[in-house]
Each structure stands twice: as C-alpha cells, then as structure tokens.
C-alpha cells in the first residue's frame, strides 16, 4: 500500500509539471504573437539571417524577413511587346526579354515588397524564366520544333511531311457549339457562308504553337524584396512567341506594399 501511495504521488507531480510547462509555453507563444502583430502594424522590421541546418553538407538558408504594412499596391498593366524580328508572320519562334520593362514598371509602382505576376494574353505565346542569349534562342527554336514539328499544311519553313493535327482541319471547324459561340462573340457571323469562309481563311495552321505554349506555361510570379525582383544573375523573364513574328501583349500585375 505504501508503494502504491508513493507511485501515485510521483505520477501526480509529473502530470502537474507537464501541464504547467505546456500552458506556460502556450501563454508565452500567444503573448509573443500578439506583440509581433501589434509591432508590425506600427513599424518596419527588416531582418536578414544566415544559417546552416544539421551539418556542413546542409543547404545554407538566407532569410529576409520584412514586416511592413504601409500603403498597399495593386496595379495592373497591359503592355504591348513589339517583336524584334523582321518580316510578316511565318510561324517563327522568337524570344523577347521582359525584364527591362518589368524593372521600369516596378520603380514607377514604388512597391518595396510583394510579388509581380506576368501572364501571356495569347494561346501561342509563353512566359518563362531563363537566360536571354541569342544563340540559346536559336537552340530553343530548334528544340521546340523537334518536339512539336509544324503541320505539313502550315507556312512554316520547318513544316514536315506527314505531320497533321486535328486543330488544323480548318475546313471542319467550328465543330462544336463552344467554338461557334466564341466565333460569334468575337464578331464572326459564321451562320453566313461568306463570313464563315473569311474566318476559315484567316485561321493559321498553328496547332504545334498551341501545344508548345501549353508545355512552357503562360505565366510566372516573381517575388519582390526591398524594391527588387528576386531573380538570379543570369535570369530574365522571357516572352516566347511560338507563332510569330508579331507584336504581342502581356498582363503585368504588382501586388504588395510600398
């Protein structure tokens, strides 16, 4: 009986110590969280720390913590990007550097911390982040056209015999109520035979361009810290025209704080 009493007392004190420690930590965490929130509403705190985790082979993590809730920024720009290539549209692939435009608009926005979103407004262009280098652009064109060669019916100099895509069967389109409705919404009275033929005549044979756009992606988001875009030394934000050369438009949105 004495042993049972001693064990019960020990268990009681262990449980009491555990609960006391748990609630103390919870109260401290709540207090710190409330203090940090209140502080961040009145001041700007920028703190940069560098640390390595576990061992010398672990990655070094550099953290920039900025707590600033000053004037919010939410700006959208529709920007026309002129082509750098010459000649009429011939389903060529070209690369345009958006970085100078983005940096200029970022300065005008006065945004210090946030994110810039870049989106293509076409189904045959793409947005990506990589190096802007002329010979690499030639490599990109050759590689992309090997992945999705142009239709034998297209105007591309790289068209291949025996390659055909369903999308390029213009004489059978529109073959769905959805596409027919989109034609009407864009000003084509396809119920009139002459108008229908005009629409078909202006439709390019460019299914391969659509497919490549899907592979590359149509948007990118870039963090902004202390007024600068967070991209690498050799990185640029690129517009890849997969059905050009043509002037193109992109949407650029800044969201953050001054």
Image (cartoon, grey):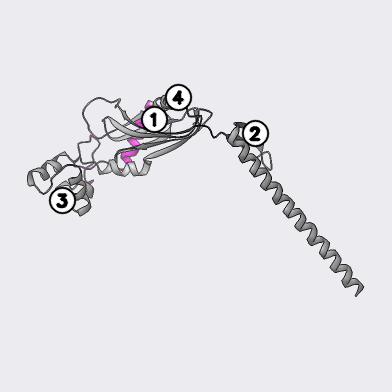
The part of the chain drawn in magenta is 134-163
Q: Secondary structure at mark 3?
A: helix
Quadrant of the snapshot with the N terminus: bottom right
Q: Earlier in the sequence, mark 2 or mark 3?
A: 2
Question: Looking at the image, is 31 positioned above or below residue 70?
Answer: below
Q: Earlier in the sequence, mark 3 or mark 4?
A: 4
Tell me the CA gap for discs 2 and 3: 62 Å
Q: Earlier in the sequence, mark 1 or mark 4?
A: 4
Q: Secondary structure at mark 2?
A: strand
Q: Nearer the viewer, mark 1 or mark 2?
A: 2
What residue did someone put label 1 on?
Answer: 136
Residue 167 at x, y = what percent? 22, 48
What residue did someone put label 2 on?
Answer: 49
Give neighbour class at mark 1: few <14, some 14-19, many 20+ (Cα, 10 Å).
Answer: few
Q: Nearer the viewer, mark 2 or mark 3?
A: 2
Tell me the CA gap for discs 2 and 4: 26 Å
């Amino acid at each position: 009986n004495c042993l049972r009493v001693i064990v019960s007392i020990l268990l009681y004190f262990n449980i009491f110590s555990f609960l006391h420690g748990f609630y103390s930590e919870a109260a401290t965490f709540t207090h710190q969280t409330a203090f940090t929130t209140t502080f961040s509403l009145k001041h700007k705190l920028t703190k940069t720390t560098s640390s390595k985790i576990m061992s010398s082979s672990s990655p070094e993590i550099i953290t920039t913590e900025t707590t600033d809730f000053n004037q919010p920024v939410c700006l959208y720009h529709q920007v026309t990007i002129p082509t750098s290539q010459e000649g009429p549209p011939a389903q060529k692939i070209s690369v345009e550097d958006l970085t100078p435009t983005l940096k200029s608009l970022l300065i005008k926005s006065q945004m210090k911390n946030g994110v810039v979103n870049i989106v293509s407004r076409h189904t045959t262009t793409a947005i990506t982040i990589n190096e802007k280098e002329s010979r690499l652009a030639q490599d990109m064109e050759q590689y992309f056209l090997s992945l999705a060669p142009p239709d034998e019916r297209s105007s591309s100099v790289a068209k291949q015999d025996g390659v055909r895509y369903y999308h390029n069967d213009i004489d059978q389109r529109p073959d769905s109520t959805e596409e027919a409705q989109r034609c009407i919404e864009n000003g084509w009275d396809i119920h009139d035979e002459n108008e229908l033929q005009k629409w078909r005549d202006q439709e390019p044979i460019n299914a391969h361009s659509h497919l490549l756009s899907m592979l590359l992606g149509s948007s990118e988001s870039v963090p902004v810290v202390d007024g600068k875009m967070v991209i690498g030394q050799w990185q640029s934000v690129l517009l890849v025209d997969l059905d050009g050369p043509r002037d193109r438009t992109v949407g650029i949105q800044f969201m953050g704080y001054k």
